[in-house]
Amino acid sequence: MTVEVTKQHIKEGWKRSSDFCPVAKAVRAVHLGHYMYVLSNKIIIDKNSLFPQHVPLPWKARLFIWLFDRGLPVIPIRFEL
């Protein structure tokens, strides 16, 4: 699945938020219907279930999160999950 972090996601995103960072907003836009949250290196889907799914983030998304959380400039990105 292709995830696209847009300018709007960046504008509305919150730093250091596993629920409202731009990457989390972009993943939710394409992966509807599941509870999830984003860590710096992976996404956890259905956190409240007995067997949550851990999906590793590609390096491009990890770097984006690292820069964004520090208030450094970021641009829209696209990555595959």
Image (tube, grey):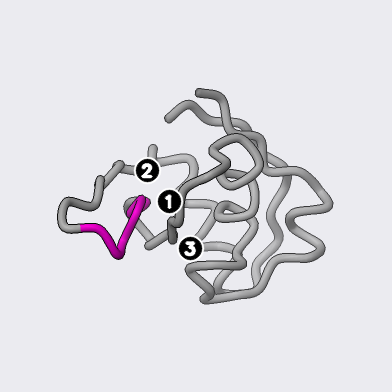
Q: Is residue 8 magenta?
A: no
Location of residue 36 in the rendering, given as x and y in whole percent from the top left corner: 43, 56
**Which residue lies under the disc numbered 2?**
57
Q: Is residue 44 magenta?
A: yes
In this picture, residue 15 sits left or right of residue 42 = right
Q: Nearer the viewer, residue 49 or 45?
A: 49
Is mark 2 in CB contact (under 8 Å) with mark 1?
yes
In this picture, residue 20 sits left or right of residue 6 = left
**Which residue lies under the disc numbered 3?**
66
Residue at position x 71%, y 61% from top? 73
In this picture, residue 63 sits left or right of residue 6 = left
Q: Mark 2 and mark 1: span between their CA atoms? A: 6 Å
Q: Amino acid at mark 2?
A: Leu
- Per the rendering, the mark at residue 62 is 1
The label nearer to you, 2 versus 3, is: 2
Location of residue 12 in the rendering, given as x and y in whole percent from the top left corner: 78, 65
Residue at position x 48%, y 45% from top? 61
Residue at position x 48%, y 40% from top? 60
